[in-house]
Image: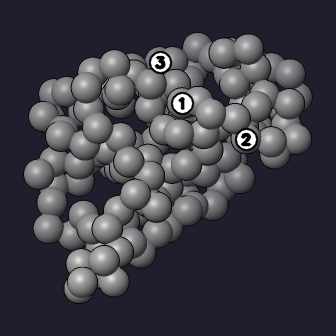
Amino acid sequence: MKIVVSACLLGENCKYNGGNNRCEAVLDFVKNHEVIAVCPEQMGGLSTPRQPAELVNGVATSVDGICVDNAFRKGAQMAADLALKEGAEMAILQPRSPSCGSKQIYDGTFSKRLISGQGVFARMLSELNIRTLEPEDLPSEDLERT
């Protein structure tokens, strides 16, 4: 199976603060699949590190008030096009991200408050009928043994 994965979950240092969100559960899950690693924010031309951003009234805006929406949408479209071209069947995405969050995102006030919603890239994938998961949705070893 071909799976799109947020590059930060694979240990790539592409997170806004220059770090990553390496997740062993994701690495274990994808080890026998073809992985398409993406960071829509970098693909859209944003640097790493960069100012944190949230969706403010649906527009990607950095904490210092700069609109970064064009870069978010450009990168999301590039990543979605790649997913389609490669025939991805699902995506495992970084939770809460303004790009990749598939269940919840920050509310746009930079107060760490979460709301139901999807990031720009996650929404595009959903509209393309590509299943999106977060690491917590993956089957655990304990569940597989029972």
Using the image, determine if residue 37 lies above or below residue 24. Answer: above
In the rendered image, residue 104, in percent from the top left (x then y), is placed at 60, 39
Query: Given the image, on which type of amino acid does mark 3 rest?
Result: Lys
Upstream in sequence: badge 2 or badge 3: 3
Q: Which residue is mark 3?
A: 74
Residue type indicated by callout 1: Gln
Q: Nearer the viewer, residue 114 or 37?
A: 114
Q: Residue at x 46, y 61 (%)?
A: 136
Question: Which residue was labeled with disc 2?
Answer: 114
Q: In the image, which is nearer the foreground, mark 2 or mark 3? A: 2
Give how far apart the Cα atoms at labels 1 and 2 are.
11 Å
- Name the residue beneath numbered marker 1: 118
The secondary element bearing badge 2 is classed as strand
Q: Is residue 136 above or below residue 60?
A: below
Q: Which kind of residue does numbered mark 2 sit on?
A: Leu
Crowd around label 1: few <14 · some 14–19 · many ≥20 (10 Å): many
